[in-house]
Image (cartoon, grey):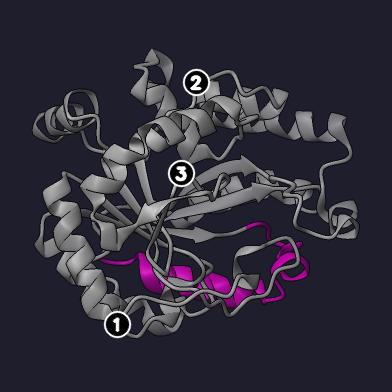
Amino acid sequence: MRTFSPILASRALWQLRVKKRPIVMSHGINARCNMHCDFCEYWKEEKDEMETGDILHLLDEAKKFGIKYYNAWTVEPLLREDLPRIMAYARSLGFITSMITNGKLLKQRAHELDDVDYLSVSVDGIDSYKDIRGMDFDELLAGIEAAKYGRRNPILINCVISGQNLEDVEPLVHLARELGVWISFEPLDESGGIDPAVWEIIGIRDNVKYENVLDRVIRLKKEGYPIINSLTYLTMVRDRNMDFRCHASDLILNVTSDGWIENCRLKTEHLGHIRDGLVNVWESSREQRSKITKECEGCLFFGYAEGSMLYDFKPEVMAHYEWI
């Protein structure tokens, strides 16, 4: 659960507004996945993975650079045996740590995640889950149950809304309350690298049904259900209206499994490599990052949208966005 820290807030503002550097490092900690979902491109990319020592060195440099949050994600972090060591080292440096997992190995490795402050699990449905992810929902649920006890903050389950899981959206909200976890939503991004036949199965095609589902999510948020998204964001998702100025590249330093620094998860143009130094890459890529952002058609990834609106001090988002 988000708690306000005046000291952390002031340091974040100094980093963002005065030093003009990001506060989050989002690290693609590995290049492998134990799920091969049709709608995902990440597991199809062949990339090298950094050795443990190189990651620890990166964390040292990120600390000096002023990063406050370390997020381990893609493609499946729990496939790294050294994950507990990496997260422990990040926390020892003072980072607030987070991790995103598909949950397939969560039951087996839940006891190793004490140094993960904020744990997010991808949960795209209940009845539709196996069709979407190819894994039994009960297996996923057992992993969440194993991971949630003794944690400093509630687990977050993140649901990507698609045409295949609209019936499961409201039941997932009720399940989140029953489990004592948070839930977030974001719409499916139909990337161009996936077979169009896949989008015909999973893409959002019934717009009326989609909007009705989002209206219900908004009502549940107002009723106090544990939905972390702000009302402003949920309204934009319902209307598919990207009414915000994107600051993703100002807020987040994106590092791939093989050490490339990229603008964001959607615009993967290389800005430089970590071997060139974070400060050097950041300073030398200002014009490039600005150009990419200006030319981007935008997206509704919730971390980017909510973070950007927080960056611009949107009052409703500051009041109602509940994650880190």
Between circles 1 and 3, the one closer to the viewer is: 3
Apparent side of residue 265 relative to residue 22 in the rendered image (left or right): right
**Residue at point 30%, 42% (across, down):** 282
**Residue at point 16%, 57% (across, down):** 61
Residue in the foreground of this view, choosing between 136 and 245 = 245
Q: What residue sits right under mark 2 in the picture?
A: 245
Q: From mark 2 to mark 1, how far is it between C-alphas?
A: 38 Å
Q: Secondary structure at mark 2?
A: loop
**Residue at point 84%, 60% (across, down):** 195
Q: Is residue 116 above or below residue 279?
A: below
Mark 3 packing: few (<14 Cα in 10 Å), some, or many (20+)? many
Q: Quadrant of the N terminus?
A: top left
Between circles 3 and 2, the one closer to the viewer is: 3
**Disc 2 residue type (three-letter):** Arg
Image spot of residue 232 (x, y percent):
53, 21
**Disc 3 residue type (three-letter):** Asn
Q: What residue sits right under mark 3 in the picture?
A: 263
Residue in the foreground of this view, choosing between 159 and 295 = 295
- For the residues bearing labels 1 and 3, Cβ distance under 8 angstroms: no
Residue 133 in magenta? yes
Q: What residue sits right under mark 1 in the picture?
A: 82
Residue 222 in magenta? no
**Residue at point 10%, 64% (across, down):** 92
Q: Secondary structure at mark 1?
A: loop
> Nearer the N terminus, badge 2 or badge 1?
1
Residue bounds of the magenta highlight: 124-150
Q: Is residue 129 above or below residue 242?
A: below
The answer to whether residue 224 shows anywhere in this view is no
**Main secondary structure type of the part rendered in magenta:** helix
